Amino acid sequence: MKRALIVVDVQNEYFDGGALPISYPPHSFEKIKVAIAEAQKEGVLTVFVQHTSLKENAGAFVRGSHLWELHDEIKNIKPDLIIEKNHASSFIGTDLNWRLRNLGVDTVTIIGYMTQNCCDATARDASQLGFNVEFLSDANGTLAFSNEAGEVSAEELHRAFLVAQAFGFSRVLTLNEWIPLLSKEKSCH
């Protein structure tokens, strides 16, 4: 088993933008940082993904803006790969699948923002592409939503997508359940 940690869209928009403040689960950002540190300590390939909106008059994720940039605490970490994407999935319109396959990766771990959008889409596509997928429940995050279809709390939305991921796409784990798997993998090589 060769694992890659895919860190999805940990960008300033979710911290400083005002419109998309990640609120659940608590401390997801701290868990993301721990996951990255543990992965790098164990030699796990680390991929940072950054979303760029191609929409004209985009209100968020505008290339070159402060809100588009990776959070400073993430930006100061050197990943093995950086992927820029324009769709919810980190695989659509990018060479991520090709890069991971060429490096012998067969398992991907998904962390980042937002649980129900880019993290979910990335995990689903990874599963469809034949990767083993791990989805860290406490190192993914979201916020409450309200639109013409209704409204949902951040906790309800997060939990519903974790249940859907576990149903058919991913092995859903907490950070503390995942960390021991990294050293077990290393001892198998």
Image (cartoon, rainbow, N blue to C red):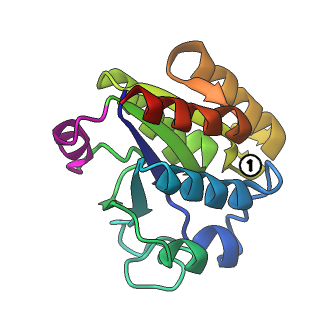
Image x and y of residue 127, in percent? 39, 24
Q: Nearer the viewer, residue 63 or 33?
A: 33
Q: Where is mark 1, residue-wise?
A: 145
Residue positioned most to the top = 167
Residue 12 seen from this side = no
Residue 171 seen from this side = yes
- Total residue callouts: 1
Which quadrant of the rendered structure holds the N terminus? top left
Magenta region? 94-105
Q: Quadrant of residue 55?
A: bottom left
- Is residue 154 left or right of 86 when viewed as pictured? right
Which quadrant of the rendered structure holds the C terminus? top left
Image x and y of residue 93, in percent? 23, 49
| Label 1 Cα crowd, 10 Å radius (few <14 / some 14-19 / many 20+) | few
Residue 95 is covered by the magenta coloring: yes
Q: Nearer the viewer, residue 59 or 112?
A: 112
Residue drawn at point x = 49 percent, y = 47 percent: 118
Residue drawn at point x = 51 percent, y = 71 percent: 60
Q: Nearer the viewer, residue 69 or 108?
A: 108
Residue drawn at point x = 74 percent, y = 49 percent: 145
Residue 55 is covered by the magenta coloring: no
Disc 1 secondary structure class: strand
**Which amino acid lies under the numbered mark 1 shown in the image of this protein?**
Phe
Residue 115, above or below 67: above
Q: Quadrant of residue 117?
A: top right
- Is residue 53 left or right of 96 when viewed as pictured? right
Image x and y of residue 146, in percent? 75, 48
